[in-house]
Image (cartoon, helix red, strand yellow):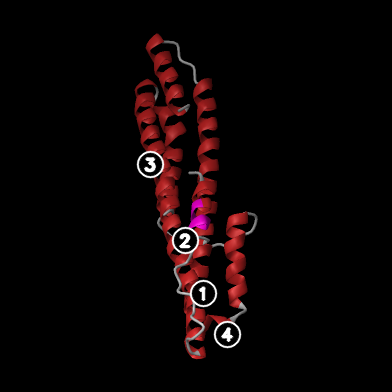
């Protein structure tokens, strides 16, 4: 879930050329003004569309990572259950529930303030803030500004959520490996099962 790469792609797309016909000097003044008002409208539509698209990608990758770990932990729990059902319940039941809750949380909207600390998102946030104070420039595109701002805030929230999930998975795997390493059993077949569990969690 490399959010930096995703955001870079988003910004490069947004700052690419916008296909807006340049006004001809012979066109009437009111027509020129109409074309000028179309520029922020098209930009805001692009911001919203691509923010929504990147949010979907972030969500999809986070869900994939959680699903993979959830399947892995269920397999580990079943394997350890054969050795010690009490240990399997104590070690895995709570973490499996937590992973399920994190997956469910991906379905909802997570809003955040306009981005700060990320140069790419800062650039987008600044452009929206600028347009917010230019009501005369926006014309009929004021509703699009609200939609673009909402999408960007939602994307920022999802990126923060994805970072939290990434940190949880990293720390959880470390903790799980430590728990399994401390778990010692005497029969050779049991020791082999524990080694396999540690190998699984180290992936």
Can residue 121 be seen from the camera position used here?
Answer: yes
Label disc, if present, on residue 67 of the rendered structure: 3
Q: In this view, does 9 lie to the left or right of 187?
A: right
Distance (Cα) linking label 3 and label 2:
24 Å
Q: Magenta segment: does it hold 115? A: no
Label disc, if present, on residue 18 of the rendered structure: none
Instruction: Tell me which residue sits at (55%, 36%) in the image.
Output: 171
Distance (Cα) linking label 1 and label 4:
11 Å
Distance (Cα) linking label 3 and label 4:
48 Å
Q: Magenta segment: does it hold 10? A: yes
Horizontal and vertical percent for residue 24? 48, 81
Label disc, if present, on residue 136 of the rendered structure: 4
Q: Which of marks 1 and 2 is nearer the N terminus?
A: 1
Q: Is mark 1 on a helix, strand or loop?
A: helix
**Mark nearer the viewer, 1 or 2:** 1
Q: Earlier in the sequence, mark 3 or mark 2?
A: 2
Label disc, if present, on residue 40 of the rendered structure: 1
Instruction: Tell me which residue sits at (38%, 20%) in the image.
Output: 83
Decide: is 190 above or below 103.
above
Q: Which of marks 1 and 4 is nearer the N terminus?
A: 1
Looking at the rendered image, the quarter that the C terminus falls into is top left
Q: In which quarter of the image is residue 134?
A: bottom right
Distance (Cα) linking label 1 and label 2:
16 Å
**Mark nearer the viewer, 3 or 2:** 2
Q: How crowded is mark 3: few (under 14 residues within 10 Å), some or many (20 or more)?
A: some
Horizontal and vertical percent for residue 71? 36, 36
**Mark nearer the viewer, 3 or 1:** 1
Magenta stretch prevailing secondary structure = helix
Q: Is mark 3 on a helix, strand or loop?
A: helix
Can residue 115 be seen from the camera position used here?
Answer: no
| Region in magenta | 9-13
């Amino acid at each position: 879930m490399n959010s930096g790469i995703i955001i870079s792609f988003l910004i490069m797309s947004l700052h690419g050329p916008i296909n807006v016909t340049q006004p001809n000097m012979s066109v009437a003044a009111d027509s020129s003004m109409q074309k000028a008002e179309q520029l922020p409208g098209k930009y805001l539509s692009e911001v919203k569309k691509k923010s929504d698209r990147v949010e979907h990608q972030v969500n999809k990758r986070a869900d994939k990572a959680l699903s993979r770990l959830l399947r892995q932990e269920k397999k580990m729990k079943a394997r350890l259950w054969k050795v010690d059902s009490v240990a399997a319940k104590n070690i895995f039941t709570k973490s499996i529930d937590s992973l399920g809750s994190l997956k469910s949380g991906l379905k909802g909207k997570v809003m955040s303030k306009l981005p700060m600390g990320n140069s790419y998102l800062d650039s987008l946030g600044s452009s929206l803030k600028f347009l917010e104070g230019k009501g005369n420039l926006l014309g009929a595109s004021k509703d699009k500004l609200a939609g673009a701002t909402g999408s960007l805030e939602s994307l920022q929230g999802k990126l923060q959520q994805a970072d939290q999930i990434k940190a949880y998975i990293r720390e959880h795997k470390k903790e799980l490996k430590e728990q399994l390493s401390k778990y010692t059993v005497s029969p050779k077949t049991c020791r082999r099962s524990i080694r396999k569990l540690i190998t699984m969690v180290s992936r």
